[in-house]
Image (cartoon, rainbow, N blue to C red):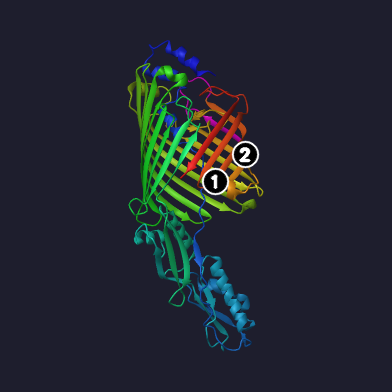
Amino acid sequence: MRIKQVAVGTLLSLSLTGWAVLAAFAQAPDAGKIGQSVKQAPPNLPLSPPAKLDISPTEEQVSDTTSENELTVITVRGFHIAGQTVYSEKELLALVKEAVGQELTLQDLHNVAARITKYYRRHGYLVAAAYIPAQDVTDGIVRIDIREGRYGKIQFSGDLPVSEQTIRRALGVKSGQIIAENALERGMLSLNDIPGLTARGTLTVGDTTGTSDLIIKIQKARTVSGSLTVNNFANSFTGKNQLSFNTNFYNLSGSGDLAAIRGDATGPGLTNGKISYTAPGGIPGLSFGAAYARMHYKLGDDFASLDASGYSTSTLLSANYVLNRSRDHNLYAQIGYEGKRLQDKVNASGTVTDKKADTITISITGDSQDKFAGGGISSYSLAHTWGNLDIMSADAKTNDDITAQTSGRFEKTTLNIIRLQRIADRVSLYSCLTGQLAGKNLESSEKIILGGANGVRAYPQGEASGDEGYLATCELRYLLPLPQDKTGIFQLIGFYDTGKVTLNKNLWPGYSGVNSRTLAGAGVGLQYVKPGHYFLRVDYAKKIGRGEAQSDTDKNGRLWVQMINYF
């Protein structure tokens, strides 16, 4: 369809009131919708780097055993286990009950004790050991001693870009604690999460029997990183071709903090900027964040005659906590506040619409890797938002009261699930599902959007915006047989996208037209990655079905290109 014809025809009557003009131009994107498009990004699959930990050979834990003839046979009437704190004696005796009543040599007894050692280590107690101490076993009761393995000294070496207190707080383990793989792995990964450093840990024999020293080597990492991105992902009425940059500054204050600056521009049609800051919160796994963003737009192309422009601002505060941190599974919780201010101005009608919204969002985010059906990586997030919308312009508020009634309190729940599944050596399957439920009709900045480079790619950016709905993507990826260390990673991709939205959660008297949209498309793509340096993605998509684009000129096919240079 040609939106220009609608716009020109409607401009013939400027006697309409301000809110009526806005209703007539309902297809024109506003600050909320454009802001959604700016924030919209391809879903990530976070990967945890391996925990950098070496376990050096430790002293033989059975060195206290008797030195008598190994061929001596003992009739075992029972066992007594001492030194354990993690498990009860009853639990450990169950591991060796088959040996009771047997005639065993000392070597057989060592093997019995080894069952307990394996049990400990299978459950993540890296240096725990059970052994047979020197003893009188004439009564047939054999004693097994447990050394569960505790930290001796915890030392740091190298160039410390942050205080030792910050490093110890992130590590989370202390001298005297039992050495457990989960806690140590979490600590080492948390250390490497501190901006501006890398850490490698080594366990060595401690000065005291039954202890191991943890030696951590700290290296200062780069203090600045970023990316420069060029794509054609933006809304056509603000300019399709978009230039973006993102710069991260690590450890500015010496406390393990992170500051970031982001900017996006399509020329005079769209400018967007965001600054953010995150700092550790005083206990392991806790951090606090703050951010401010401002976006300005001016409509062109088919809507140039409206002389329409606007802006949005956003202030964000958040508290984040790491619930679980490991190589195979990570889980994070966040609570955040966002205060938004939006303004849309149509000079052709002298209309200005001001809105503000305050929201509180609680979310859970996680990622994992597993060996299911050949191995795969998953990522997921679940969030619930409570908010309040205040429409401050009288005409717009009057129009809202008799139509969508978005003003006032609202709620919504969003879900995102991603899976990258190995199919064969060079073949993988990527799938993504995003969904949203709403408690009432929502303002445009809170809606789910189907069309665009990160949605149903056969439709334009911003197509099919609704209160509730889902968006699903499936991609079959083939890794080209090229030398990756020299050329990088090339993948051929075939994809299918589909989604459905309910435009308005609740209808109102006088509403006409459809209230749902279903979009689908398929296509092919090429992806090139040279980790840490370059990323290139090209997609060509065609529609499936007869649904025409309504937010922009309808096309049989769409081409999307994105190039990123990392520094």
Residue 67: x %, y % from top left = 56, 87
Residue for point 41% across, 61% down: 172
- The picture quadrant where one finds residue 516 is top right
> Which amino acid type corresponds to the residue marked 1 in the rendered image?
Lys
What residue is pinned by disc 1?
A: 530
The quarter in which the N terminus is drawn is top right
- Judged left or right of residue 515, residue 273 is left
Q: Are marks 1 and 2 in contact (CB under 8 Å)?
A: no
- Can residue 449 be seen here? The reply is yes
Residue 431 placement (x, y as % from top left): 59, 42
Q: Provide the residue designation for mark 2.
A: 493
Q: Quadrant of residue 97?
A: bottom right
Instruction: Name the secondary structure under disc 1.
Output: strand
The x, y position of residue 502, in whole percent, is 52, 29
Q: Of the numbered discs in the image, which one, if any, rests on residue 402?
A: none
Q: Say whether residue 437 is magenta.
A: no
Seen from this angle, which residue lies furthest front? Answer: 486
Residue 454 in sight: no
Between the C-alphas of marks 1 and 2, the distance is 17 Å
* Foreground disc of the pair 1, 2: 1
Q: Residue at x 60, y 27 (%)?
A: 557
Hey, what amino acid is under mark 2?
Answer: Ile
Which stretch is magenta? 492-514
Image: 559 above or below 530: above
Q: In the image, is residue 506 part of the stretch drawn in magenta?
A: yes
